[in-house]
Image (spheres, rainbow, N blue to C red):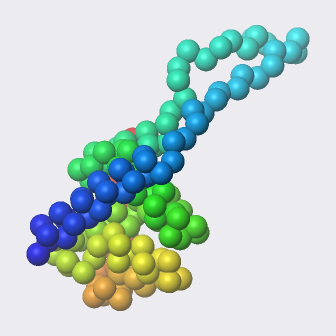
Amino acid sequence: MNRISTLIIGLTLGAAVGLQAQAKRQAPMTHTQPMSHPTNSKAATPSTTAPKSNSDSFKGIAQKLGTTPDALQTAYETARQADPKLSRGNFVAANMLAHNLGTKTPAVTTQAILGGLKGGKSIGQTLQGLGLTPKDAEDAERQARRDAARATM
């Protein structure tokens, strides 16, 4: 059952990546340099590094979850379209919780958590609604925060 849900999530992410790429081509980000001023101790020099793409911010988390940064970025953008109030932190937490708890509690999926957040519930309330005790929900949230922090180091 868990493998089927993992496969479905994977296919959904794959389809979302394809649809997102076809639907919207994003203009390249431009990087502006500060103007030099006589009071600056050092004159402005052109940047030698390219700006990070948005998906690079998901690099560590994506590796931990066994996916790609681009797929995670696309999934986040899709989730934000469904719930404009969704924060990046809650999105990462939902994915990390589903990753950590999905094998023991199959009802805990990323979509179930995101659905609870969209409905105005907290992550803890959502986890309790999916069958966890208040203590287990709190412990799971704490572990997900630790895992996410380690993945971004």
The spot of residue 30 in percent (x, y) is 64, 29
| Residue 54 located left or right of residue 4 | right
Residue for point 36% across, 44% down: 69
- Picture quarter with the C terminus: top left
Residue 28 occupies which quadrant of the picture?
A: top right
The spot of residue 88 in percent (x, y) is 50, 58
| Residue 147 located left or right of residue 104 | right
The spot of residue 29 in percent (x, y) is 60, 33
Q: Is residue 106 above or below residue 19?
A: below
Residue for point 43% across, 85% down: 125
- Picture quarter with the N terminus: bottom left
Q: Is residue 31 above or below residue 61?
A: above
Residue for point 42% across, 73% down: 114
Out of 144 and 48, give the one closest to the viewer.
48
Residue 51 occupies which quadrant of the picture?
A: top right
Q: Is residue 124 above or below residue 54?
A: below
